[in-house]
Image (tube, grey):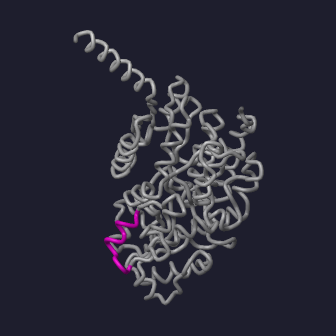
Amino acid sequence: MWKYLLIGSLALIISCSDQQSDLTVLMVWAHAGQAVERKVLEQQVKRFNSLQTEIQVQLTFIPEQSYNAQVQAAAVAGELPDMLEFDGPFLYNYVWQGHLEPLDKLLSAKLQEELLPSIQKQGHYLGKFYAVGTFDSGLGLYARRSALKDTGVQIPSGPDNAWTDDEFATVLAALASRDPDGRVLDLKLNYSGEWFTYAFSPLLQSAGGDLIDRNDYQSAEGILNSPQSVRAMKALQNWFTRGYIDSNVDDAAFVSGRVALSWAGHWEYSRYAEALGSDLALLPLPDLGKGSRTGQGSWVWGITKHSKNPQAVVRLLEFLLQPNEVLVMAAANGAVPATRTAIARSPLYGDKGPLQLFARQLQGGFSVPRPQTPAYPVITSAFQQAFIDIRNGGDIQNAMDKAATEIDQDIRDNKGYPQVD
């Protein structure tokens, strides 16, 4: 009998060993953003792990403030995970550094067609698809509807009939004339860093300017400091000099009723809706001549070149992009769902949803991705400094010239950021 028990035990050991050898363990890094996002992602990974026996995901959260630095350090050490989350605009620099695997032949064509145009556009670089998000972002003007009605102004119904520069100036003046301190617009000056490029570069594009020449991404000269870009920033500076802007140091300018307009993203909707109820309206950003433009982009997922199991990573990506999983994350963080099916099913972003404008902007070509170049970290840093100088009353042309020069110098220093195989 002992002989049979021994044989049985050996068979069991061999069986377990075989099962272990078939198990693929994926290392996944994500940013430690909002607590609700972390909780949902943890639950999604737990669901994925429980639905099959071939792949187990080990999820690690990295603090957002040091995320890029830790990615760079891991890349140097050859210790990048299989799947990496990163802020969308960093995609092009990561590709240039050779960290990411193209997704074109890994993700099914059907799934790629399901993605919003903005998600597809942001994920592409040099003709290849490198990264995909499960959600996108929305940017617009939140408004106190009753305050606008008191001024008698026409409220835009969508980006096609957004206020012109002159109309927006008239609205601000009318609101200010009825306000105790005349400060009627919140630009989220309490935010920092990337917010200023995300939120205000659409003004440049609406006026016919931009951050860089997108034909070849080799120069900002004559584009960032063009008459069109300078005119856009002049409009913005006028809002400051005329005293319309609330500094919003307490992040309560809009919910407390101090201002009637707030230039903000989708993430503010739940707080604003709770404070204003049916008096809350969502409007497009003003049209400075070339149509209303808005920001787009959020955190995305990519497969690193260091992964030995890209097909297993794709199974995780396809799971996260299932409509139900996309909607679970969107319900938690309030962001725009990344797929057409999820948008149609969303109570917030569907046809009659209160945030339908954000979905319409992303699907209708009104959003502009941040420049798809490895030089983006320098571009955003230079524009942010120009914004600060202009906000503080500096000479606009000088500020934009300085930013364009800094960007062009970086591109020259990197020999035009040639493609690296």
Question: Is residue 271 in the magenta section?
Answer: yes
Indicate the quadrant where residue 96 lies.
top right
Q: Residue at x 36, y 73 (%)?
A: 258
Q: Is residue 244 above or below residue 53?
A: below
Residue 401 point in image, percent of width and height? 69, 52
Q: Is residue 378 visible?
A: no
- Residue placed furthest toward the top: 3
From the viewer's perspective, is 288 left or right of 64? right
* Quarter of the picture holding the N terminus: top left
Name the residue nearer the viewer: 146 or 267.
267
Does the magenta stretch mainly form a helix, a strand or a loop?
helix
* Quarter of the picture holding the C terminus: top right
- Residue placed furthest toward the left: 1
Q: Residue at x 65, y 51 (%)?
A: 371
Question: Is residue 346 in the magenta section?
Answer: no
Name the residue nearer the viewer: 101 or 321.
321
State the extent of the magenta-drawn residues as a range. Answer: 268-279
Q: Residue at x 52, y 44 (%)?
A: 301
From the viewer's perspective, is 263 left or right of 383? left
Residue 66 point in image, percent of width and height? 44, 37
From the viewer's perspective, is 253 left or right of 226? left
Residue 327 point in image, percent of width and height? 43, 59
Q: Residue at x 59, y 46 (%)?
A: 107
Q: Is residue 63 visible?
A: yes
The number of numbered discs placed on residues in the rendered structure image is 0
Residue 13 point in image, percent of width and height? 34, 18
